[in-house]
Amino acid sequence: MRTKIVYISTLLASTLTFGSCHNNKAENLANPKVAVEKTIEKPLSDNKIQVAILLDTSNSMDGLIEQAKSRLWNIVNTLTTLKYEGKTPEIEIGLYEYGNDGLSSASNYIRQVAPLTNDLDLISEKLFALRTNGGEEYCGAVIQDAVKQLTWKDGNKNMKLVYIAGNEPFNQGNVNYKEAVKNAFQQDIYINTIFCGNHEEGIRTFWQDGAITGNGKYFNIDSNERVRYINTPYDDEITLYNQKINETYVSYGRKGAEKKMNQVAQDANAESVSKANYVERSVSKSKAVYKNESWDLVDKVSEDEKALDQIKSEELPAELKGKSKAEIKTYVAQKSAEREKIQKEISVLAKKRQAYIDSEMKKEKKQDDLGNAIATSIIELAQKKGYHVEK
C-alpha cells in the first residue's frame, strides 16, 4: 500500500503534494466490496529507488547518529517527491555501521544493520538502537560489503545510491577504496561521501576523491551541531491525525501484533528527538511508500483483493475472531476509508506546513547536516536519471 522541523531545502516543498493513497473509498462505504477492491496508486513494480546509508559508529560519532535519527523521515519525504514517468517508485533503505570496536576484526568492524527494505519502521528501530564504540574505520571495506551483500535491482529506471559518513581518512583498511567505488559504479551504484569535519580536510583525506570516483557528491558537515527545527501552526493537528491513523491498522499473522506495537514505538522514538521530527514521520505515514502489507490487513487487501480468502482464522487479531468473511471485509473496508480520509487531511496540512517552513527558511542560513546533504544530492542525482520532482 501503498519534525520543530529541520531546515529543509525548498526543493522539499513538493514532498507534501502526494495526497491520499486510496481513491474515493469514503463514499464507497455503503458498498464494502467495492471499497475493498479499490486500490491505491501502487509503485512501479519494475522501478525502485534504493538508498544504503553507511554510518561511522566509532566513539566520536554520537552527533552523526543523532543527526541520522533526526533526519530519517525528512529523507523519506524527499524520496517521495520523485516520480518516474509520472508514477511513484518503490523506496528501499538499507543501513550499515562501521568503525565500531564492538564488532569483530574479522568483519573489518562492519555490520549490516538492515538490508534494503521498504519496512521503514524497521529502519527506524535499527537506527535508534545504534551505539558508538571504538574505532577502526575502513571505508573501502564497508562500501565493498554494501555493494556485494545488498540486493540491488538492475535496470536503468532504478536509482541506486550509497551514502557513507565518517571522519577518518577514506583510504584506511586493506580494501582499496578506489576499487570498491569503481566496482559500485560499474553496477550503476552512485557513491556519495559525507565527511564529518572541515571541507579541506575531507579533500586531503580522500573523501572527495571517493565521491568523484563514484560519480556521486561530496559533502562536509559538522556532525556535532544539533539539528535546528522550525515549529509550525500545523504541527499539533498533524500529530492528532497521526494518532488516529494508527487506529486504522489491522494486524494479522504471526508477527502482526508485534509489528503494530513497533509502529507506536517508532512514533515514540521520533518524538523523543523532537516534536517536529514526529510530525515529519506522521507525514511519511500518509504516503504510499509507507507500506505494511506484511502485517496490516488494510495494506494487504489493497495489494491483493483476494488476501482475506487466504488468511487463516488464527492469524486474525482479537477484534476479528469469530466474524464471517463478509463482516471482516466490511471491517477492513471501513478502516481503509478512515485511513484515506486521514491521509487527505494530513496532505492538506502538510502542504501548508511546508509553505510555512519555506518562508521561515528564507530568514535563516541553511544548515549543513547529514539530512540536508542527502536530500540535496538525491534530488540532483535523480534528475540526472530521468526522475522529476513532483510540484
Image: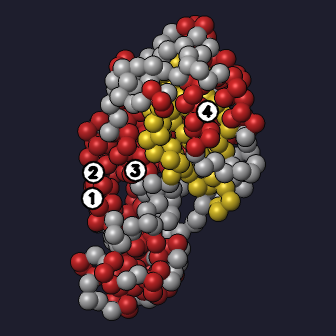
The residue that appears at 47% across and 40% down in the rendered structure is 112
Task: Check contact, mark 4 vs mark 3: CB within 8 A.
Answer: no
Spatial CA distance of label 4 from label 2 is 33 Å
Measure the alpha-carbon separation of dots 3 and 2. 11 Å
- Which one is earlier in the sequence, the residue at label 3 or at label 2? 3
Q: Can you tell which of label 3 and label 2 is closer to the viewer?
A: 3
218 and 339: which is toward the camera: 218
Residue 343 appears at what percent x and percent y?
Answer: 42, 61
Note whether 24 is above or below 42 in the view shown.
Answer: below
Q: Using a 10 Å C-alpha cutoff, classify the residue at mark 1 as few (fewer than 14 neighbours), some (14 to 19) or many (20 or more).
A: few
Give the labeled residue for mark 1: 261
Q: Is residue 169 above or below residue 95?
A: above
Identity, as a three-letter code, of the amino acid under mark 2: Ala
x and y percentages locating residue 48 in the rendered image: 63, 52
Q: Are marks 1 and 4 in contact (CB under 8 Å)?
A: no
Residue at 58 percent of width and 45 percent of height: 150
Kindly tell me whether residue 147 is visible in this rendering.
yes
SS at mark 2 in the image: helix
Residue holding disc 3: 122
* Disc 4 crowd, CA 10 A, few/some/many (<14, 14-19, 20+): some
**Residue highlighted by disc 4:** 144
Q: Could you give the CA–CA distance between mark 1 and mark 4, rounded to whole angstroms?
A: 35 Å
